[in-house]
Image (cartoon, rainbow, N blue to C red):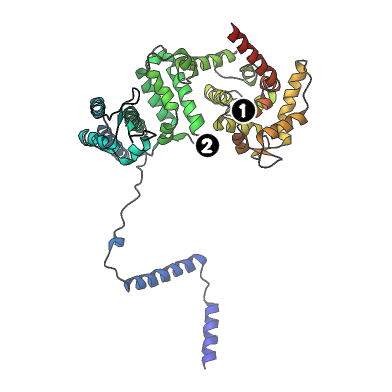
Amino acid sequence: MEWERRLRARLAARRAPKKSEQELKDEEMELFTKYYMEWKGGKKSDNMSYANIPRFYYRLPAEDEVLLQKLREESRAVFLQRKSRELLDNEELQNLWFLLDKHQTSPMIGEEAMINYENFLKVGEKAGPKCKQFFTAKIFAKLLHNDPYGRISIMQFFNYVMRKVWLHQTRIGLSLYDVAGQGYLRESDLENYILELIPTLPQLDGLEKSFYSFYVCTAVRKFFFFLDPLRTGKIKIQDILACSFLDDLLELRDEELSKESQETNWFSAPSALRVYGQYLNLDKDHNGMLSKEELSRYGTGTLTNIFLDRVFQECLTYDGEMDYKTYLDFVLALENRKEPAALQYIFKLLDIENKGHLNVFSLNYFFRAIQEQMKIHGQEPVSFQDVKDEIFDMVKPKDPYKISLQDLINSSQGDTVTSILIDLNGFWTYENREVLVASDSDSTADGDET
């Protein structure tokens, strides 16, 4: 009977060993593949391109595959050389300027030569194939402003071409140091690039060769401090090109760079010597490292002990002492307190509970040290409650009870807030801002009278 057969089948199934989860998955995949192929076979397409999927992933050679690595390096070098030959050289740029000047469109506005779209296209035809990419309607429209005759400035266009050529040249130059060939530079790659760049920068002619390694370290740290916030140890080449640091570095090619420009340029010889000289002056025991006590004399010597404790807790140290590279990060953070990367560095030190925000407890923890310093200097301590209210008023955080890093950045008051919490001199400057502004105004008025 039917029910007897079913019963026997069920009992037999119970006696059979149970399949593992993996076996069930394999069986399911096998059935899926079988039914899918049957369905696919019934809908044969004339286009069989799906059977030949192009290769889109190429494995990088392993360290022991020396021949493959060498082949990859050589092929990249050939590719970059070809790209370099596609760029306009000095002679071609001079020819372009001559053609633009020859086809300028009247009337002139002041001393600025202009060109209309018709003549623009004529120059493009005569300038040669390398220039073709610059003579498009899109670029013309981008440079078109309020000229009543629909023309663009020849100088602006030529500067645009020069900038593009420079960017491509620099990208190729940086890519030659990209050992991994992945579009980024590691710290050692950027060090090699800057070391080989030094002889081409007239403003660095006076540097002793013994100082080169310290100069390179000083220069590289600025790139990594601001462009590698997650501390991955590598920076994208496109990020290097997008920031202004490379412009500052290559500004040192100018033999007549003003003293003021040198002082404000982190990469100049006077600036690098200043930073390294400060480090040597702080290193009283001359062991090449800085202790917390030695670092406490940094700047005006008014950083609080609580803040310095946090620096040595959170930053990389060696037997409780700071090396030059870590010191450079510290200097870059304190000298650029308006910048997001600097605020991120300081915020991490202020966030003692590691919660991703500053609350009343955090603010009080740091401000107590300011109050203690005020007592030592014979000043009447300011109420924390008043300072706390002022900080929250300045920042205006989304959450009225805590301040995030983004709140601090968005407020544009991050430099003031951090100065109030970590530096007695910074707090004093904030407290006496009205008096200082008034004295500056008086000084200006006296200068005008004389």
Residue 243 placed where, x, y %? 45, 31
Q: Residue furthest bottom?
A: 1
The residue that appears at 58% across and 10% down in the rendered structure is: 448
Looking at this view, is 265 or 396 the one in front? 396
Residue 432: quadrant of the picture = top right
Left/right of residue 150 with respect to residue 325 in the rendered view: left
Looking at this view, is 46 or 13 the one in front? 46
Q: Alpha carbon of mark 1 to alpha carbon of mark 2: how far?
A: 21 Å
Looking at this view, is 126 or 212 the one in front? 126
Image disc number at residue 358: none
Q: Mark 2 points at which residue?
A: 230
The residue that appears at 37% across and 18% down in the rendered structure is: 253
Q: Name the residue under label 1.
A: 415
Left/right of residue 284 with respect to residue 376 in the rendered view: left
Amino acid tagged 2 = Leu
Secondary structure beneath dot 2 equals loop
Whether residue 391 is visible: yes
Amino acid tagged 1 = Asp
Secondary structure beneath dot 1 equals helix
Residue 323 placed where, x, y %? 55, 22
Q: State the quadrant of the C terminus.
A: top right
The residue that appears at 32% across and 38% down in the rendered structure is: 69
Residue 332 placed where, x, y %? 54, 25
Residue 76: quadrant of the picture = top left
The residue that appears at 70% across and 35% down in the rendered structure is: 392
Looking at this view, is 70 or 13 the one in front? 70
Left/right of residue 352 with respect to residue 217 in the rendered view: right
Whether residue 82 is visible: no
